[in-house]
Image: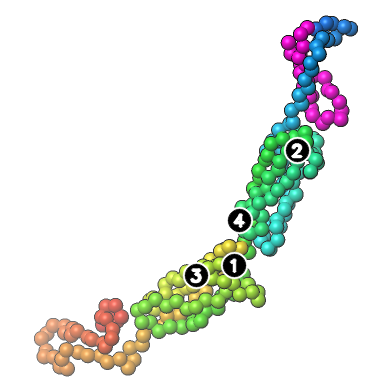
């Protein structure tokens, strides 16, 4: 037979209402207490399982600075604050670079199981960077223009492909072309600057008509106009 008592064994054991199991052949009743006559007794105390709701993370500087981020961990069993390295251990993972970091809390001693929490490390906002282009003006020639880009944060020159990526827009037709740098790795956000694509001046261009003179017809005369190197309707219009 097995008998279960919910009496606390000792205040030295920080287990709430420990259970002990006694195995025996028969029992007697002395002073209104059940007693077991047995030569074999087994005492089992189960460690208490940690719960996710017990674990909270403290405040920390969320912006990447090259140092490990280790937000303080608090574990509470009800109103009882558990002791680190006595009731649980803490390990951090991926807690240096920008992105998602993980903290693992593992029960020890009178507690068991593990709880994982995640926290974010934000990249440095590249919007405050300085962008310098190798060229700020181009003459229209029908091709894409991609000036070289230098990006600096303060005095630090960032590395393309590691710290940022470059995108070009509206960089073929006359008008404003744009360069956008997008943060990568430990940087996030984006920054943008512009450059100019200048229209071709028709001044000095050779304009050709099919004939030098036309006979009166009573109707509107609209001879085709040719400008060397340019395409009618695309590069110029005739009125």
Q: Is residue 63 left or right of residue 207?
A: right
> Where on the picture, by quarter, is residue 98?
bottom right
Residue 99: give its label: 4
Q: Is residue 176 left or right of residue 219?
A: right
Sequence-wise first label, 1 or 4: 4
Residue 81: percent from the left, percent from the top? 80, 39
Sequence-wise first label, 2 or 1: 2
Q: Is residue 175 visible?
A: no
- Frontmost of labels 2 and 1 is 2
**Crowding near the residue tagged with mark 2, few <14, some 14–19, many ≥20 C-alpha atoms within 10 Å:** some
> Where on the picture, by quarter, is residue 236?
bottom left
Which residue in the structure is indicated by mark 2? 108
- Frontmost of labels 3 and 2 is 2
Residue 154: percent from the left, percent from the top? 65, 74
Which residue in the structure is indicated by mark 1? 126
Q: Is residue 57 left or right of residue 204?
A: right
Sequence-wise first label, 4 or 2: 4
Kindly report the distance in space between the C-alpha atoms of the residues bearing marks 4 and 2. Answer: 29 Å
Secondary structure at numbered mark 1: helix
């Amino acid at each position: 037979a097995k008998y279960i008592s919910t009496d606390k064994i000792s205040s030295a054991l920080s287990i709430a209402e420990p259970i002990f199991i006694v195995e025996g052949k028969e029992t007697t009743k002395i002073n209104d207490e059940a007693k077991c006559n047995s030569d074999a007794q087994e005492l089992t105390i189960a460690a208490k399982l940690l719960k996710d709701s017990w674990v909270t993370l403290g405040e920390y500087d969320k912006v990447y600075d090259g140092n490990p981020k280790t937000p303080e961990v608090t574990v509470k069993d009800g109103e009882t604050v558990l002791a680190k390295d006595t009731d649980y251990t803490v390990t951090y993972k991926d807690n240096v670079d920008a992105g998602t970091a993980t903290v693992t809390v593992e029960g020890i001693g009178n507690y068991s199981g593990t709880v994982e929490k995640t926290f974010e490390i934000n990249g440095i906002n590249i919007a405050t960077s300085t962008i310098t282009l190798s060229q700020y003006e181009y003459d229209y020639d029908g091709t894409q223009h991609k000036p070289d880009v230098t990006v600096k944060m303060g005095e630090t020159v960032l590395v393309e492909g590691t710290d940022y990526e470059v995108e070009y827009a509206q960089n073929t037709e006359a008008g404003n072309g744009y360069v956008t740098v997008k943060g990568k790795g430990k940087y996030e956000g984006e920054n943008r600057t512009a450059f100019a694509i200048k229209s071709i001046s028709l001044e000095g261009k050779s304009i050709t008509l099919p004939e030098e003179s036309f006979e009166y017809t009573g109707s509107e005369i609209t001879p085709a106009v040719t400008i060397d190197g340019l395409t009618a309707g695309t590069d110029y219009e005739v009125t």
